[in-house]
Amino acid sequence: MEISLHESNQQIFKDVCSNFISSLSSNMFTYGLGLMLLNQTHSALSFGIELAIGPLISLIFMIPIGNLVDKYPHKKILLTSLLVRVVFLLLLAATLNYFVGMLKFIPVIIFVSVNSIAVIFATTAYSASVHELVNENKIHQLSSLTSATNSFANIFAPVLGVGVYSLLGFQSFIWIEIGTLLLSAAITLTMKFHYQNSPTSKNISQQKSQLANFKKGLDYIAQRPLIKSLITIAMFLNFMFSSINMGLPYIISTQLHLGNSPIGILETFNAVGGLLAGLLMNFVPGNKAKRSRIIVPLFLFGFYFLSLGAIFTLTTELKLINVLGSITMFIGGLGISILNITIQIHIQKTTPTAILGRVSSTMNTANTIVFPIGTLFFTFIFQNISNGALTYLVCGIVWLLVITLMTPHLNKSISTDKNLQKSLE
């Protein structure tokens, strides 16, 4: 039975509320964790710890996550994920103060590892459940508004993160995160998931069965040239972007000695760009200008890297860095959100629901597995050169060369994917 328009709108409203509070709190927590580790250890890895661990966890658990998400009720997976995160936050609060200096990484790594498993389960289950929450005509709106909501939360997260950390210290972030996770769980309990088939609780205990089930997702991806092209591009792009996630705070705070304030400002404008993209995409038909919404942002990222490199090379003036850096981060946030929303909607609308969990798990793992490599690589680079801005100039030039060479193949994949996915339905 098709989900009504009224119920779809109710589900979207609940989802937006839940995503706002959880995204705001989680990003504040990540920000506070990075500041605490940076102040305690002075390591460039402080803001890259989740980028280094999360993808490795995703790779290790890729097969069971994809299979279990397609096998068990998505609502139960989401609620279990939230409760597991609460338990390990309590353990982090109880043990963190027993470690000092570089030893702080011990409880943090344990927590981040478990938290990453829970988040990956929840993210994959959410991606696979869109058809259970809203009707087909509302998937575009759900994805766009969810992305906009997350970006809206990210606007406030850096500023609030700096303020809370300065006034209350890191422990306060733990209790805020626990409260918002419980609130998010309460909202999820009120949401109705319309399962197309009665989910079975049969346990997958044999490794052969696990691999056989997961292989169906790989076989499906192998028959979709656009998905394969996007995975290849995303892997290289995410390798490059790891230099932003962990390098930008290091350059500003450690190399330029400008404090934490510019980091928050630049991250805020990056989120503003993402918010605008989510709001705009809500009014753009899903199939309109799909080719441009994929290819144009890819070229934009080259100029994004070059602009950051030029700014940090040419000036150390705080006001100029705030203004020019904010404009650049805004454009970067706009581009990455348009690209992500376009791809997400396309995958969700064209992939059969029964296999969507395995496809999403495979794509997420492939797209993020390069983050640990990139984080370690760029950590070494930034800590061994005095001018980290040169790294961004090189990244920009390399990215533009690579994407120029790959564009003809990407164009061909976009042209053929529509007919191929129809034949696979």
Image (cartoon, helix red, strand yellow):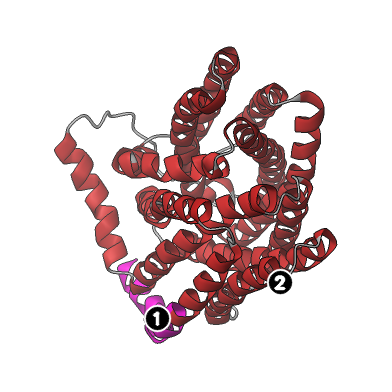
Res. 220 image quadrant: bottom left
Q: Residues within 10 Å of mark 1 (few under 14, many from 20)?
A: some
Distance between the Cα atoms at labels 2 and 1?
31 Å
Label 2 or label 1, whichever comes before in sequence order: 2
> Can you give x and y, in whole percent of width and height, for residue 110 in the image?
45, 26
Question: On screen, 378 above or below 187?
Answer: below
Inspect the magenta stretch and tell me whether residue 66 lies in it: no
Question: On screen, 298 above or below 222?
Answer: below
Q: What amino acid type should be assigned to the residue bearing mark 1?
A: Met
Residue at the location (43% across, 83% down)? 407
> Can you give x and y, in whole percent of width and height, for residue 45 in the image?
52, 42
Judge whether residue 195 can be spotted in this image: no
Magenta residues (range):
402-425
The residue pinned by badge 1 equals 406
89 or 417: nearer the viewer: 89
Q: Quadrant of the C terminus?
A: bottom left
CB under 8 Å between discs 2 and 1: no
Question: Mark 2 falls on what kind of element?
Answer: helix
346 or 196: nearer the viewer: 346
The residue pinned by badge 2 equals 314
Question: Mark 1 falls on what kind of element?
Answer: helix
Residue at the location (20% across, 44% down)? 211
